[in-house]
Image (cartoon, grey):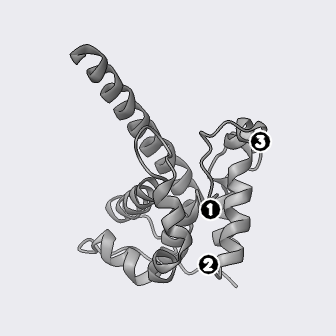
């Protein structure tokens, strides 16, 4: 089935698009697991995934890129659906950057009805850490927005730690 792409209306509100396309995902009990696991700095996996989803929708909307809105929103929200705390010392967590997209796609398929396109977006969001590059505009948007948000969250965490160190 071909991907149906459209422009996101300029007055579209990302949070409303997320609720429209992802309410089933947000209601799933495993989203509480995401809320309890840290991603970058003090940011939870759920907060990170929500930020990536909103930013991806804003990028597509503001740059007037026709996208499959449902696939973009759902894959962005599930791109880090690996459901474990990768900061906990474990031999397999040392390879987290390389392996978590596949685990996230597997978990997402188990818990949610994903299209082939949505699975591909989740699996390729860590390019070039994973060898298969994104090949759709939705996959590229999630890949690039994820890196920008992750960098911001990480730097914010460093800044907080540095500020605490200087006030002690």
Residue 17 in which image quadrant: bottom left
Which-is-in-front pick, marks 1 and 3? 3
Q: Position of residue 4 (x, y in %)?
A: 56, 81
Q: Is residue 4 above or below residue 41?
A: below
Q: Residue at x 32, y 20 (%)?
A: 162
User: Dot 1: what SS?
Assistant: loop
Q: Is residue 135 above or below residue 87?
A: below
Disc 2 and disc 3 in contact, CB within 8 angstroms: no
Of labels 1 and 3, earlier in sequence is 3
Residue 136 has which mark? 1
Disc 2 and disc 1 in contact, CB within 8 angstroms: yes
Of labels 2 and 3, earlier in sequence is 2
How far is the residue under mark 1 from the one under mark 3?
30 Å
User: Dot 2: what SS?
Assistant: loop
How far is the residue under mark 2 from the one under mark 1?
10 Å
Quarter holding the C terminus?
Answer: top left
Residue that mark 3 sits on: 92
Q: How many dots with numbers?
A: 3
Quarter holding the N terminus?
Answer: bottom right
Q: Residue at x 47, y 78 (%)?
A: 22
Relative to residue 133, is residue 55 drawn left or right?
A: left
Q: Callout 1 environment at 10 Å: few (<14), some (14 to 19), or many (20+)?
A: few
How far is the residue under mark 2 from the one under mark 3?
35 Å
Q: Residue at x 76, y 50 (%)?
A: 132
Query: In front: 83, or 147?
Result: 83
Q: Residue at x 60, y 61 (%)?
A: 81
Q: Position of residue 166 (x, y in %)?
A: 25, 14
Residue 3 has which mark? 2
User: Dot 3: what SS?
Assistant: helix
Q: Is residue 70 above or below residue 96?
A: below
Query: In front: 104, or 164?
Result: 164
């Amino acid at each position: 089935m071909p991907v149906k792409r459209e422009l996101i209306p300029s007055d579209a509100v990302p949070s409303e698009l997320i609720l429209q396309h992802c309410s089933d995902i947000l209601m799933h009990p495993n989203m509480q697991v995401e809320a309890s696991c840290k991603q970058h700095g003090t940011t939870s996996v759920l907060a990170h995934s929500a930020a990536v989803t909103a930013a991806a929708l804003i990028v597509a909307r503001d740059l007037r890129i026709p996208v499959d809105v449902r696939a973009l929103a759902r894959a962005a929200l599930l791109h880090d659906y690996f459901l474990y705390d990768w900061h906990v010392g474990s031999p397999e967590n040392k390879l987290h950057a390389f392996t978590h997209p596949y685990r996230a796609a597997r978990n997402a398929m188990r818990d949610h009805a994903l299209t082939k396109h949505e699975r591909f977006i989740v699996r390729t969001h860590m390019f070039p850490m994973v060898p298969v590059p994104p090949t759709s505009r939705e996959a590229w948007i999630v890949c690039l927005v994820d890196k920008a948000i992750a960098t911001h969250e990480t730097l914010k965490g460093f800044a907080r730690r540095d500020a605490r160190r200087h006030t002690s």
